[in-house]
Image: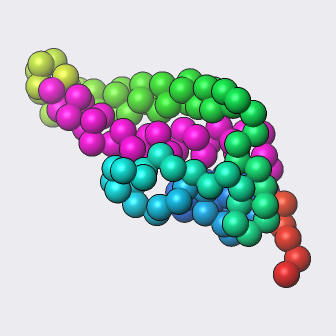
Amino acid sequence: MPYKQSVLFSVLNNKCPRCHKGDFFETKNPYQLKKFDKMFKRCPACNEDFERETGYYYGAMFVSYGLTVAFGVSVFLVMCVLFNFDAMTYLVVFAILQILLMPIFYRASRLLWINIFVRYKETKQ
């Protein structure tokens, strides 16, 4: 499967899971904090519904939890095992990184969640 047709393309480029052409979030910059969480109701390119039902994105919290745990374990392995930092330094660094990366994890978890249920479908244009 080519990269353009993969879930990874949709998640990393903020694209619709169905057509991979329209944007999922209104802004490309996750650090524009007033609008980092604003999504389009429908895909501007293929009209795919992004607001499927009330509470649909509650499942994205589990994806976010998984991303956070994987990130925390990775940071722990790098800091404590490879570079022999103490646990307190790890906790401070991890907390700071987690706060800084929160908008990215928020967006990635929503995009991963919807990509579980909506498959890429090549459109002819």
Residue that protrudes farthest toward the top in the picture: 87
Image check: 70 left or right of 118?
Answer: left
Residue 55 is inside the magenta segment: no
Number of labelled discs?
A: 0
Q: Is 43 above or below relative to 77?
A: below
Question: Which residue in the rendered view is the most extreme toward the right?
Answer: 124
Q: Residue furthest bottom?
A: 125
- Which quarter of the rendered picture does the N terminus lie within? bottom right
User: Which residue is at the front of the view, 119 or 49?
Assistant: 49
The secondary structure that dominates the magenta segment is helix
Q: Residue at x 57, y 51 (%)?
A: 39
Q: Residue at x 63, y 32 (%)?
A: 57
| Residue 64 to residue 107: above or below | above
The span shown in magenta is: 92-120
In the drawing, does residue 69 fall left or right of residue 84?
right
Spot occupied by residue 20 in the image (x, y as percentages of width and height): 69, 64
Q: How is the image coloured?
A: rainbow
Relative image position of residue 53 (x, y in whole percent): 75, 33
Can I make out residue 26 in this image? yes
Residue at 85%, 81% in the rendered image: 125
Residue 74 locus on image (x, y percent): 35, 33
Q: Is residue 58 left or right of residue 70?
A: right
Task: Please indicate, yes or no, whether residue 77 appears anywhere in the rendered image.
Answer: no
Camera-nearest residue between 86 and 30: 30
The reply to whether the magenta stretch includes residue 109 is yes
Q: Residue at x 15, y 18 (%)?
A: 87
Expressed as whole percent of the image width and height from the top left, the position of residue 107 reads 50, 45
